Structure formats: C-alpha cells, structure tokens
Amino acid sequence: MEPSIPDPASGLRVPRNDSGSVEPPPLGGWTPRARVSVVVPAFGGQDALDLTLAALAAQTYPSELLEVVVVDDGSEPPLRLPDLRPEHARVVPSTAGAWGVAAAVDAGIAASAGEVVVRLDADVVPAAAHVEAHARWHHLADYFTVIGKLAFADVEASALDPESVRSAVAAGEAPSLFAGREVSTDWEIALVRESGGTVEDPARAFTIANGATVSFTRAAYEACGGMDATMRLGSDTELGYRLAQHGALFIADAEAEVWHLGQSQMKSRREEGKRYRHAFLANRVPALRHLRTRPGAQWEVPYAEVVIDAAGARLEPVRASVAAVLGGTVADVEVVLTGPWGDLTEDRVAPLEDPLLDLRLIRETFRGDARVRFAERAPEGAGRVPFRLYLAPGATLRPDGFAKLAAYANEHRLGRVETAVPSGVGPLAVRLDRTAALARAERLRGPGESADELLEALWGTAEIDPGPYFGGGPAPGGRAAKPAPRSLLRRAAGRVRRALQRWAGPRT
C-alpha cells in the first residue's frame, strides 16, 4: 500500500525556509490519502464551538479521512456535541490534573489517530477547503508546518446559527456571514506580508505559528516533544520553535481561510498578554533575542552549546578556551566538556603521577560552575539550543567573538561556519553548527548519503578567516568566506507573483 505521508528521505528537499519554491496541488485537483485529526481545545463557549463544528461538517476533505477531537478543558457545564457536526467527532477530557490550552492540545493529539494534525481554536469558522488546504502540503512532505490565513470578524457567536454557518460554508460563501462587519487580517500576518505572501526568513519563520489555524504531521509533533503543558499563554510560538529545531519548514497558506469570532485576547489585552508571554518565551526560546535583555543572565535554554573535547588535553588550553567563552559578551551559553569522566576514580594514586592528572584538574577547575557540564560524548542531533560551537582546546574567542560568529551565520543564513585558529601546535579546528539545519539534513538524508553534503545543499556553509573572532590574528593564507549558494538567495518573479496572489484578500 502506498504510504499516505512521503518518506522523509524520498520527499521534497526544500532549502532553508524557501516555501515559495513549493507549489501545492490545486484545491479539488488532487487525491487525499492521509487521515487528518482536527484537534479543538475548548473551555466553555458552547455556542461558538457549535459554529466551529458546523463549519467543519461542511469541509471538502473526505469525511472518511477526517476526525474531530474536541478537548474539554474542565468546562462547567461539560461541553457536548451538537446535532450538526462532522461524521467522526467526539469530546474527550483534558489530561487529569492539567489545565490550559497546551495541555488540552497535547491530550487531544494523544487521543487522535490521524497522520496529520490540524489544530483549530474553538471560536473560529473555517472555510470549506480549510482542512484540505492544510492537508495537501503534508502529502508532499512530512516536515512542513502550515499556518492558515486568520481573520478577525467583529461578530459574536450569538449573532450566528449553526445551520446558516454550515450552509454558507458548504456553498463557498463563508465571507457572507460577516457582511457589514469589520474584518481584520493585519494583526497575525505581518511577517508574511513583509515577504510578499510567503515566509522566507528561516530564522524567524517559526514566529508565525499560531493556535487558531496550524497543522503538522504527527511524526513531527512527536519528534519535537510536543507542547509544553506548563505554558498557559504563548505555547503555540514555543511549539513552532520546537518544530523548527527539528527541521520544520513553515508555510503560510492563504487558501486555508478561517475567521475568528470577535477579537482575540492578544488584541483586546495586547500589552498584558505580551507581558505574560515574554517571561515564559524568553526562558524557553533563545532565538527571540530581543526578550533576553538582562545582562549576564542565565536561562533555561541557552543560545549555544560550546563543546570542547578534554580527552587527552592539558588543563591550560582547556581553561583558556572555557574562560574566553564564559567571559564573552554572550552570556547565555553552556560549555560542554567531553571526556572519559567515568574513568576518574578515588583509588589511591600518587597525585603527580596520576595518568589522568589533567582530566582530573579540568574537572576540579569547572565542577562548581553551573555554566559547565561534563559529558562522555558530544551532543548530537536536534535540540532546543540554536547553535552548537565546537572548539579545539586552546582556541580562544575574543570577547565578542561568538556574538560575531553567530551574527555572521544569521546574516548569511548559513547552516555551518568553519575556521582554523593558528597556534604553536598547529591549526585548531572550529565549527559552528545551526542545529535546526542539522535536523533538516538528518531528517531528509537517505541511506549512505552524506549529511555534510546535504547540509551544504539545504542551508549552505562557509569557511572564514579566524582573525575577527579569535585571538592571535589571522591564520597564514586565511580562507575567505564562501557565500551561500546563489540558488537559495534568488526568488523568481513568477513565484513571487503566485505567492502574492495566494495571499490576496478574502475571496468573494
């Protein structure tokens, strides 16, 4: 049987967040195969939920492949299914002892069975092709995250009735439900409008994730660890970041239209909402640099892991490298010292004849520093930390060296930056990896395929002169920066025009 979702290694290989280069099948012009679970977290608001379910009952996606899971987050009275609803719909409770949207979404996904998950708010009216528009992308690749086009309609749920909603949606006339009302689409999609209808900036793409209309594959959700149930607000942005760190590509689909009934809390209580969200997002999402304003502060998720291999190294060069990292202008870093730490015992040995003397001294030097941890081997694969910097012992960053390295990688949107620092014992290798780029390459890598070559193709790499970043001056014959592949920087005019057309105003 043909799989519903393509195998990652055989699917589309889209560089960076070049979403405009992918053309989805036209609505109504393709054959759905994947099962889709629409997860709707809800706390009260039965009237609005009835309208959402009425609109979902009129979807163009095949009913036999569609299930709707409403998660009751402790409503009193409990939520119920109305008569007008999708064929396969049910209400499930949130996780016992938990509360909030994130916990409810996670419970709904756990209770669902679809290969594709569409997460919707419980007070929205999706257009007839909403689910289809989301699902068509996931039939192309399993690492896409799709965000629909959200509009805010100045209308209360009590002004509409389920039958009228179902009829209008089924007839393709959902906008008529809001005739004469103020409808705003400006608030959620600023980043999309900046780039002419697509989302091209790979460093910021995750920020468009919102809970009102977002979809991803179950495999991607499980791989990234899912929702952080401890976040009461801002969990959708944090999930977007997790997905990005595991190789997700973000797509804004203007044909996945949905109307929010009334203003969202982020519009009606914008400053209060920002104040609440910022504290939680700053601690968990290091890519949001503007939120980390406290000098010298440490955070739950560092901006970088700096890996130094202490195995066989002397104390002095390791100490110099660590001191330079921790004394730099970027404070939210973690140093990972790798080595055979398990070999260190308390058995009797002449202290100065200890065969593991330097390893023991290194551990003693740094074991009291919370910014340093010890590991038997270097961390691998995806993670929540945006960058991983590998330093040979003795390579000493200038105070602003790491900040400049990260800025260079971000400016050129590179997946890897390498250099070699001259020293009396020979060149000291340095490598800065973007973990999200590594995750994409590893996700798409086929059997026997080089991850490094795929990383170059998907994100681009560069070899640079160490002088501006490390002490000791430039290496003899230093290598100039290698620019990212031009193909990743060009945007064909026809593709941009198509993107603008897709993101035009609501259809009439």
Image (cartoon, rainbow, N blue to C red):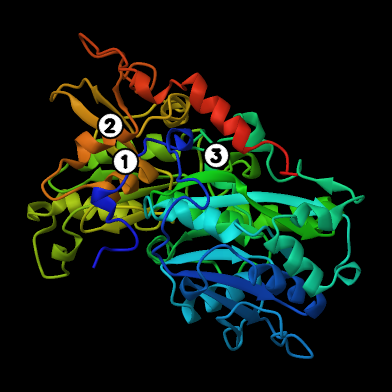
Q: Which residue is mark 3?
A: 204
Few, some or many C-alpha atoms within 10 Å of disc 3 (few <14, some 14-19, many ≥20)? some
As drawn, the residue found furthest toward the front would be: 171
Element class at badge 3 = loop
x and y, in percent, of residue 380 in the image: 27, 52
Mark-to-mark CA distance, 1 and 2: 9 Å
Residue 282 is marked as none
Residue 457's disc number: 2
Question: Could you tell me how far apart the alpha carbons at marks 2 and 3 are, in whole angstroms?
Answer: 20 Å
Question: Which quarter of the image is occupied by the N terminus?
Answer: bottom left
Q: Secondary structure at mark 1?
A: loop
Residue 364 position within the rendered picture, expressed as x and y whole percent measured from the top left:
29, 56
Which residue is found at the position 81% from the left and 68% from the top? 164
Camera-nearest label, 2 or 3:
2
For badge 1, the amino acid type reads Arg
Instruction: State the residue at coordinates (34%, 18%).
Output: 483
Q: Which residue is mark 1?
A: 13
Q: Position of residue 193 (x, y in %)?
A: 66, 33
